[in-house]
Image (cartoon, rainbow, N blue to C red):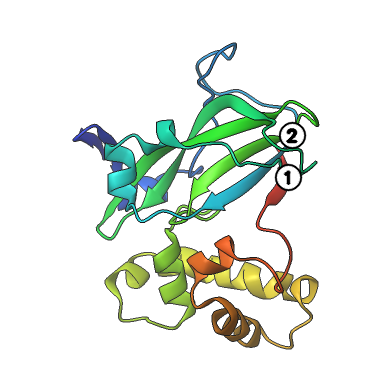
Amino acid sequence: MHGREGGVEWSSVNSLKRSRSFGGIRAVGRGFPKGPVRLWMIYMQRIYPTSLTPEQYGEQEYHKQVKPPENCPNCQQAHILEGLAYYHRYITTATALVLLIWVRRFLCRHCRISVSCLPQFAQPYRPVNTPTIAAGFNGQDDCPEVQRWSELIGVYWRRFKAHLPLLLRQPTATGFWRQLLRHCGNLAARRAKPQNMTGPEVVRSRA
């Protein structure tokens, strides 16, 4: 089931679970066609702090207010990022709704790297919101949101465990997670404060 309320597009939990893809790239910007596209370039993602909920982010169209990072995360040149496009993705809420939100993407004029800026309630390539993932990782199985998304949270945890040797050579995923919490307090803070942990807060991949 899909709908629109208060200017925000949403889907039901069942609709999202039936979908084979939790989000695609739909570029909207100068010089870009509307509709699904492929951007053959290396791109990065940065997560910025915000007090907005997913609902508030969508209702306020906050993606239009996102400013570019001061420095390019790749070449470190200052004041070099310019607006490129927007793309959409899905994010869960504290209720059974799944919202479609827009994410701002910038382009470095120097190194031609594309940089997407995600609000801190969203994790890269994960439709479940950050607080719910953190609650699941903390073993809060009685939380309704954790129960609703237990299958996906379980997938995230197994991937976390599989990548653990590459992260910090910790003996167990639980040990690494507890160390992360000791350093940063919560998952959102981890994304905003990467030092002394596993590397920069950017995610590099190919579109």
On residue 132, which mark appears? none
Horizontal arrangement in the rendering, residue 125 relative to residue 128 (left or right): right
Q: Secondary structure at mark 1?
A: strand
User: Which secondary structure lies at badge 2?
Assistant: loop
Determine the residue positioned at 43% across, 58% down.
128
In this view, 76 is above or below 124: above
Q: Residue furthest left?
A: 6
Where residue 91 appears, x then y in whole percent?
40, 49
* Residue kind at label 1, given as amino acid type: Ser
Mark 1 or mark 2, which has the lower sequence index? 2
For this rendering, which residue is in front, 145 or 180?
180
Q: Amino acid at mark 2?
A: Ile
Which quadrant of the figure has residue 140? bottom left
| Residue at the image point whose x is 60% and y is 41% from the top | 69
Residue 2, image x, y percentages: 27, 37
Residue 121: x and y in percent read 43, 56
Rendered image quadrant of residue 79: top right
Is there any visible trace of residue 12 in the rendered image? no
Q: Residues within 10 Å of mark 1 (few under 14, many from 20)?
A: few
Relative to 193, say whether 34 is above or below.
Answer: above
Question: Mark number for residue 113?
Answer: 2
Q: How many marks?
A: 2
Circle on res. 205 = 1
Q: Horizontal placement of 15 versus 134: left or right? A: left
Q: Residues within 10 Å of mark 2 (few under 14, many from 20)?
A: some
Task: Decide which of 161, 57 is in the foreground and name it.
Answer: 57
Residue 193 can be seen, yes or no: yes
Please tell me whether residue 86 is drawn above or below residue 146 in the rendered image: above
